[in-house]
Amino acid sequence: MTDTASPLPTGEEASGLPTKPASNKERMAIDRVAMPEQPGDERAHNFGEVNQGLTYQLAMLEAERCIQCPKPFCVDGCPVRVDIPRFIRLLRDGEIAQAAESLLSDNALPCVTGRVCPQETQCEQVCIRVKKGNSVAIGYLERYVADWAQKHIDELPKANPAPTGKKVGIVGSGPAGLTAAGELARLGHDVTVFEAFHAPGGVLIYGIPEFRLPKDIVQAEVDRLISEGVKVELDSIIGRTYTIPELREEFDALFLAVGAGLPVFMNVPGENFKGVYSANEYLTRVNLMGAWSPDSQTPILHGKRVAVVGGGNVAMDSVRTARRLGADEATIVYRRSANELPARAEEVHHAKDEGVKFEFLVAPVEVLADENRWVTGLKCIRMELGEPDASGRRRPVKIPGSEFVIDCDLVVVAIGTKANPLLTGSAPELKVNEYGYLVADEYGMTSMPGVFAGGDIVRGAATVILAMGDGKRSAAAIDSWLNGVWPPPAEAKAKKPERETAVAAG
Amino acid sequence: MHPVIEREQLSPNVVRLVIEAPRIAKVRRPGQFVIVRKGPGAERIPLTIADNDAEAGTITLMIQAIGRSTTELTNLQVGEAIQDVAGPLGSETHLLASGHAVCVGGGVGTAVLLPIVRALSEAGVHVTSVIGGRSKEWVILEKELTELGDVVTCTDDGSYGRHGFVTEALKDLLDAGGVDAVYAIGPVPMMKAVSNLTLPYAVPTTVSLNAIMVDGTGMCGGCRVTIDGETKYACVDGPEFDAHKVNFGELADRLTTYRPFEQQALDKLGACATTEVKS
């Protein structure tokens, strides 16, 4: 992999730099850069990162495209409200360390969001330049600056807040939990994060594959938070190892961010045959347990023909993983049409480049197996789009008599997750809604005073960045609560609750 | 890290380890298990907590060497340590409140049975343990169980105790009457046979299902079992279930999922050991 974040231009690099544009007109004339990526046919057989990151020249060129709007819409489009024009300006001015400092002060996990955020529906969608072509590649620039920061962390000033003496317990070390931990530690609170698995990161570690988000990057982000004073307790399952009432006694405030961990199955005959995985299990084996490597002690079934049911980012992650594990044929089976795919456009595009097939308007009705109960196929029925349903999308309706079989030896079910009752079961006073998700007010506080919650356990399956937004907002509210200022000032208040349809780790 | 405090070889392939795990030692209930991971790169393995000492901060694990990961765990010596121990997981055993319970253990299942026998005995329930093995050297924990109630020991080859399967001894006890509950833990065919046997006697029967799991918290769904036609997760809904409702055929089949892989891994471990000896 190339060193994508080298800060200073030398020799040839420097001479390749564009002349500085003098006016916005000149800036507007620059085309959006393309992300260097591993070729599709190559990367379909390895777990190396697909997007290689911008080179110095590309980053500087792209930074020039930002016209520095006085009222930047992009900031409003960002769930964690990164001051986007500021870090881009600092980068453009050659002040990359300051750019990094600025970015890190707004976003606890920029290496992560620079890779997995759906910028095209957030900051970039509202970029003023969209009106006349393409938005500034904010995500690419964020990744460039964040990767630089990760490699040069010692050159950045360290926050050294005065300890407040207040203790905050955070349950779950995924994007919401880590973000809240970073924010609260910087305010001087004593923060402990509890993680059920043997490694921190939550969905960033077990869910999102190496080729989209390298695990070393996640670990380095966590290490940075630890260096800022955050403590992480692994192998701690809240609801089993400790209960919520116990934690409530030990900590001045709690933030619950355990995600939506329970896999949903299709509820069709044959689902328990050998060769049917939930996406959670498939991805956890491959990502957290490292089963993608032949040296791993954790086994994984290597399908030759793999059918992945679902159309979200998790489905894309699964199907692309299947290709890398040697599947000659890897197919997405989705009950709606291409237009309704909830996955990020980039993931769908990457999947297609890697030879993934798509079966649209198709729903599984039965898993077929041989006499030894090994999967041999997925019997499906074709669908057509009817009237719009509650989600506003046209409801798929079965076409009678259209059943057919997709031959396959592995089926991965990626149709969503639901709330895990382990945690909520240990504290009956925590109010949950009809789906088992925690009920939280506009500040993220649950029905237990001083106990806050955010991320998928409140929203239902959503995205990394929305969870991080919750973490950041709740951290501000928790700080207020700890300081005896309640209700907190307006900025801690949730905007209109956003909920994405994506079945998403991204 | 969780240092090994004590190690004892119980049978040719079963080892008893006492390890440090203070928090789990304090809160664990009978029937619960832990997930252990020996170190970097190792598998996550579910193991029933056989005993605890809250004061000493230790728990006891009984490990049967089957694949590479379990073999590596049984090879651990006093002073060495397990990196990760997560738990306690699973629901606790529904214990009979009074009367007569028959606890049937096969192979390493006897180790899983021990905490249940202890809890029943402490609650004042009369316990008869029926334990078995291929031959004498495979019988484990007879002494410990004898301290907690009656014990009938069976061996397949008649080399020790009663000649024959545990189910035959169980049948005699059922015929004699007065059995209020049966707890059976062992290989799937044994649990299935016990379940079939107790059904006509209408004796409530509990089994502990050793399904394949990764996280142990309900997240992966790998441990799904069919109970009364409904999918349940052994890790959170179990591991103990009403035997008469369990689809044993499906469980037995799902347990074979990684058999080729297990053999390969074991061969690899053997090859590694040979290399070490040579160097």
Image: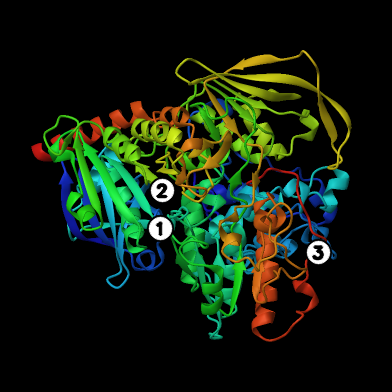
Q: Is residue B267 left or right of residue A3?
A: left
Query: Residue at position x 43%, y 27% from top?
Result: B253
Query: Residue at position x 22%, y 48% from top?
Result: B151
Q: Nearer the viewer, mark 3 or mark 2?
A: 2
**Residue B183 occupies which quadrant of the picture?**
top left
Residue placed under numbered mark 3 in the picture: A495
How packed mark 2 is, by other alpha carbons closer than 10 Å (few <14, some 14-19, many 20 or more), is some
Q: Where A326 sits versus B41, above or below? A: above
Query: Residue B98 has which mark?
Result: 1
Q: Amino acid at mark 3?
A: Lys
How packed mark 1 is, by other alpha carbons closer than 10 Å (few <14, some 14-19, many 20 or more), is some
Look at the numbered disc 1 and give the secondary structure of its residue: loop
Look at the numbered disc 2 and give the secondary structure of its residue: loop
Spatial CA span between label 1 and label 3:
57 Å
Residue placed under numbered mark 2 in the picture: B180
Q: Which chain contains the residue that carries disc 1?
A: B
**Mark 2 or mark 1, which is nearer the start of the sequence?**
1
